[in-house]
Image: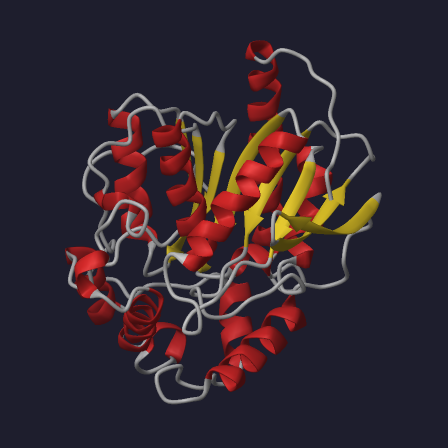
Amino acid sequence: MSSAFRRGSPAVRDEDTPPRPHEQVQAFLDSSGSSPDPWSADIATVRADAREKVLAVTGEPSAVASVESIDADGVPGRLYRSAGAERDVLVWTHGGGWIHGDLDTADGVARALVNRAACAVLSIDYRLAPEQPFPAGFDDAWTAVTWARRNFGSVAVGGDSSGGNLAAAVALKARDEGVELAAQLLVYPALDSVEDTDYKVAFRQRYATFAGRPGFGSNSCRRLQHIWETYVPDPAARKASYVSPLHTESVYGVAPATIITAEHDFLRGEAEDYAQRLSAAGVPVELYEYPGQIHGFFEMFAVMTDSHHAVGVAGDAVRRAFQSSHHNEPSKELSCDR
């Protein structure tokens, strides 16, 4: 794993050498069954399959001081605490391509983060497509942040995959609205709706038989195309700032970012592009890549050693961001209006 920030255009590397998965990734893929195609299966089937697969790899939940159901101005959520009197909160938006995922599938990550970051974590159950396409999920994430701002001294946002998209988009809106955030934590985020980028085209070709799975590259990209079409049905809207943060006119002034990527991920290129844009705009950014890893590893505590390390990196970054934010924040009495 390297924390060095790389400059230049992201690339699918070593094109003459077959990509090699981490041995734990290979074992996981060898033991994994197929999933229904989201473009042909009904959404209930897709959600049930995804939920079962996530819960099978998250492992035993970490102990926390408390978990409380929260109504954040109409957005359901769970508030996790590691000690009981935290003044800072990370608003977490789960992954799942904006079409699946829930508070249970996010539970393992939320518990791990609350213990490592030494802050509260508000995991939200935002509305999903296709029933509720953009801007429903984005609006819910923003509503949760405004609730958190009233009830905690300092707020950060974070999420994985599509949840990373929502976190990045909310960070842009916070900048636009003059709302201060301590940090944004983006775990292999979806940031660019464009299908035919150089990186994605190369990914389809080089990852055609990755880990002995025929069609890995093309199937991955087809699923990505489907979830974008489901989340934002109007193609003309897909490059809007709060939809595809990579296409925003400016990232100047957004919250400091920690970005975590996986080497063998179809979203790695846009995450690296975004890190480069942030850096060029003077936004503090840390980029961490996990060699040999795949999309989704962050929550796989039962099967991936790297997931534990990555959550540690993420939690440490959030904790440092909150510590830094306190130097600029006046103290105030805190309460929760549930």
> Residue 239 location, x and y as percent?
21, 52
- Residue 107 visible, this orientation: yes
As rendered, which of 203 and 117 lies closer to the eye?
117
What's the image's color scheme? secondary structure
> Residue 324 location, x and y as percent?
56, 17
> Residue 213 location, x and y as percent?
38, 80
Please say if 260 is above or below 256.
Answer: below
- Residue 290 visible, this orientation: no
As rendered, which of 163 and 305 lies closer to the eye?
163
As rendered, which of 203 and 76 lies closer to the eye?
76
> Residue 147 location, x and y as percent?
60, 39
Please tell me in which quadrant of the rendered image residue 209 appears.
Answer: bottom left
Left or right of 282, for residue 239? left
Q: Residue at x 47, y 82 (%)?
A: 43
Please say if 102 is above or below 277.
Answer: below
Location of the C terminus by quadrant is: top right
Q: Residue at x 43, y 38 (%)?
A: 2
Q: Residue at x 56, y 81 (%)?
A: 49
Left or right of 174, for residue 248? left
Q: Residue at x 55, y 25 (%)?
A: 321
The count of marks equals 0
